[in-house]
Amino acid sequence: MRKKIISMLFCVVLLFSGLLAGCTAGEQNTNTGTFVLGKAPKYVFMLIGDGMSAVQINAAQVLNGNNTLGEISTNNLLFASFPACGMATTHDSTSFCPDSASTATAMSTGYKTHSGVIGMAVDKSTPVTNIAELLKAEGMKIGIISTVTINHATPAAYYAHVASRSDYYGIALQMAESGFDFFAGGEISKPTGSNKDQKSAYEILKEKGYTIARTAAEIAALNASTGKCYAIAPNIQDSGSMTYAIDRQEGDISLADLVAKGIEVLDNKKGFFLMAESGKIDWSCHANDAMTTIKEVLDFEAAVQVAYDFALKHPDETLIIITGDHETGGMTIGYASTGYDTAFNILNNQKLSFVEFDKLVKSMQKADSNLTFEKVMPVITQYFGLKLPSGNAEADAADPLVLTDYEVEKLQNGFTQAMLPSADREADEEYALLYGTYDPLSVSITHIINNKAGLGWTSYAHTGVPVPVYAYGVGSELFNGYYDNTDVFHKLCTICKID
Ligand SMILES: [Zn+2]
């Protein structure tokens, strides 16, 4: 026992000395990503994966890694190699499981506030200035991008001040008043207000001088001489958001495309601040759909690549920050029934998101009033690879995609509930645990395929685990260490020389 404790202590000492050595090396690094003292960055990228913490990132690294026994290795994302990495706590003044409004406000303004509040202090009435407004006042151009609606909580925290994130119309009006130079991504949520009786926010944006581009050709035509503009991706999928990467068709616009366009529109001699959010990592984690989440993370990485390529061309004057606002879903690698094993290769059988699968089943149900589980099962096999047992026990045991009796029952129960009108479903605790507010069939399918792969979920909401913060470029060293999400703002102010 004592021997064990001593060897554990030795390991801890080794670990700490390793970490310290890493820090020292980081500060002395004179290659790429150096800290140029006395100079603020001209270009700042703040790239946020909503709902993205270490597990979402590592799940993507595992899926793309080597899953062969004896050769296990991750295939790390680009930002994992950034010279600085820290950890940020995400609680807000209401909860250790915070929401996007308060966490984005913490990062954009340095203030903790209540869940649901955007750009206001904890009294819910005092507007607090955000980093984008401060940098705008310094003469920089400002760009705000989100794959979900542009007046959703995270992007709004970089231009709006409202007591409630549900005040979509109020947020849209502040977007029009912001004077910011580039908005892009999803549509405006509730553009004519909750009662649909207000003047269209799109019209107000036009009156305020914004060019609104809605087609690929119109977006392609935007450039540095366009003036203030708002690019809405033509590929809109659900609730005004852009298509999930897993469902995207050729020619559809991606987050990476919009970051590239943002750079083109914003580039000027005084520099720019560009906040880009991948908002649907969060949405697919709420729904406990791991493969859709992983594809979103990889798509987010493609957007980081665009910023990184720009930074390589503008060394010593660019800063890139990558983080999440909070974790969503309580995603973890490892599951009760798979123990120490993982089999992420199984996930590659999933060909669409839960959203598209739900649409598919709804259309089948519409066309066939006697839709049975037996009729839906081939579609489940087609899009997720999962199979009913063949009867040959040996062959079935060797095929990881064959469902166990327990899993078949789970799927059948999910199907039965899914066929009922929402009002007729069992509104008990077990139902809430099994399906949350999601379609009982698709969430059963993703749970089963995720669990078979060795991946688990604990929640349909946000969790309280800290998020990693990666940084590259001017001042990036400041993002090493363990701190609070409000410090992201303070560190940015220090680096950008704002009081
Ligand atoms: Zn969020």
Image (spheres, rainbow, N blue to C red):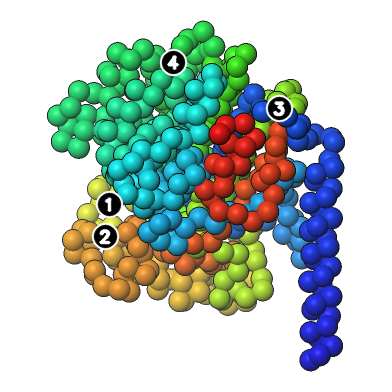
Disc 3: CA contacts within 10 A as few (<14), some (14-19) or many (>=20): some
Instruction: Give the CA separation, mark 2 to mark 4.
Output: 48 Å
Is residue 191 positioned above or below 322 on the image? above
Between disc 2 and disc 4, whose residue precedes?
4
Q: Which mark is residue 469?
A: none
Q: For the point 53% across and 66% down, which residue is it?
A: 456
Q: Which mark is residue 365?
A: 1
The answer to whether residue 262 of the structure is visible from this angle is no
Between disc 3 and disc 2, whose residue precedes?
3
Where in the figure is residue 187, as x and y percent of width and height? Answer: 36, 30
Instruction: Give the CA separation, mark 1 to mark 2.
Output: 8 Å
Q: Quadrant of residue 414?
A: bottom left
Q: Amino acid at mark 2?
A: Met
Between disc 4 and disc 3, whose residue precedes?
3
Q: Nearer the viewer, mark 3 or mark 1?
A: 3
Q: Judge left or right: residue 170 versus residue 132.
A: left
Residue that mark 3 sits on: 39
Where in the figure is residue 147, as x and y percent of width and height? Answer: 46, 36
Q: Amino acid at mark 4?
A: Lys
Q: Nearer the viewer, mark 3 or mark 2?
A: 3
Q: Does the residue at mark 1 contact the one at mark 2 (Cβ under 8 Å)?
A: yes
* Residue lying at the far bottom of the rendered structure: 1
Residue that mark 4 sits on: 228
Between disc 1 and disc 4, whose residue precedes?
4
* Front residue (pair 231, 284): 231
Disc 4: CA contacts within 10 A as few (<14), some (14-19) or many (>=20): many
Q: Which mark is residue 419?
A: 2
Q: For the point 56% across and 34% down, which residue is it?
A: 499
Q: Does the residue at mark 2 contact the one at mark 4 (Cβ under 8 Å)?
A: no
